[in-house]
Image (cartoon, rainbow, N blue to C red):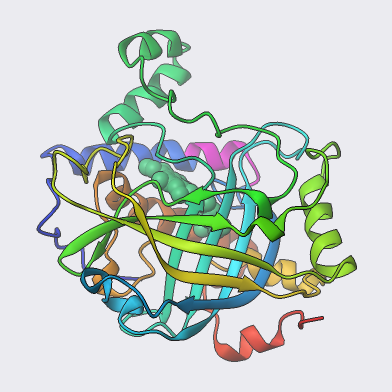
Amino acid sequence: MLTQTRPHPLEIIPEDEADLIEQVMEMQIQIMKTQDPKKRGQHPKQQALLRGVFEVSDSVPDAMRVGVFAEPRKFDALFRLSTGPNPKDSDPNPHGFAIKLIDAPGSPTGSQDFIFLDQPTFFISNLADYVAFFESMVENHAEAYYKAHPHDFGLNQTFNVVISSHLERQYWSEVPFAMGQGAARFTLIPDPDNVSDRDPANTPDGLREALEEYFVTQRRSAKFLFGAQAYIDEATTPIEDAKSVWPTLFDTIATLTLPAQDFTAPEQFEFCEHLSYTPWNCAPEHQPLGGIQRCRKRVYEASSRLRHGLTGGQNVEPTKADFDALGQDL
Ligand code: HEM
């Protein structure tokens, strides 16, 4: 994991941030204790671990040609598709799509992770609001919070819905990453050919069934475009307001290809349970930016440590040999 926590020139760090992060840590550990603490503290349900290729485009804008996007090339990548707190896929949930590039240049762990959800921005602006919201929930005063923050959650029409398949969704990083001295937010756009004619999930494991039908039974491959929208200035594209909508357009800077593959072996499922995806698994050029990201550093580490401590597993970053050992292309 990136150990450097020196602020990036684009960050503005509030004085009370360390206390707020401590409070989020405590809340997160409490949440884990009420769930299965051997699972991830958020997005615990693994739908699939898929292998594929992340190909950096040959037309990356000059300002974004840094880190893993410095030159056109291919990376082996592992994708963890997940869902949020509701264990049944037929219930509304947020849907996660996490990417891990293997053998990424410059990353202290060898991995470059990008983590996405199917909503355009985070649901809350900053850590102070995050703590206030969770405290209001614990104290049963959430309504007072909503009154004081009428615009929170408003943009997230795609949050908490029932979907047909992870392969048909658009995803967003929601929060920014450095691109060298500049910054960007990212999106994943599904290829129109990823679409199947399935109904929204109507069984408890409908989303995993959709992926099995697609990759294993029908032997189809899926594609996504990886887009980046550039930071302009603090007024137009705020770094520290995770709920803000950035008005800049997305440029395609990479494509993801997930070939037809058999991902269903129980060992593959187990292997993924021992992986940790965090935005802080990164090259220094892609340092995560903003208060929400700075908080994620400690919280993801703590969640990973707690669950690995209980499972007796170890958090090791995957190698090319691990990648090659996973369910092969069909
Ligand atoms: C203060 C804000 C946040 C907190 C406290 C938080 C907390 C967590 C924790 C504890 C985990 C499990 C880590 C592990 O055990 O490996 C996790 C995973 C995840 N988070 Fe967050 N998170 C935050 C913000 C975000 C944001 C902005 C996104 C938007 C993309 C996001 C999307 C995800 C996803 C998709 C996963 C699952 C990753 C995987 O597949 O392993 N989180 N989060």
Q: Would you say the magenta stretch is mainly helix, strand or loop?
A: helix
Residue at image x 57%, y 89%? 320
Residue span colored magenta: 30-36
- Residues 272 and 253: in front is 253
State the image quarter where residue 97 is shown.
bottom right
> Relative to 249, is 8 on the left or the right?
left
Image position, residue 111 (x, y; %): 44, 77
Residue at image x 51%, y 63%? 225
Quarter of the picture containing the C terminus is bottom right
Q: Is residue 200 above or below residue 211?
A: above
Image position, residue 264 (x, y; %): 82, 68
**Magenta-colored stretch includes residue 278:** no
Image position, residue 237 (x, y; %): 22, 44
> From where the camera sits, is residue 226 visible?
yes
Q: Is residue 179 above or below residue 208?
A: below
> From where the camera sits, is residue 277 visible?
no
> Relative to 29, is 326 on the left or the right?
right
Q: Is residue 179 above or below residue 298?
A: below
Quarter of the picture containing the N terminus is bottom left
Residue at image x 31%, y 44%? 292
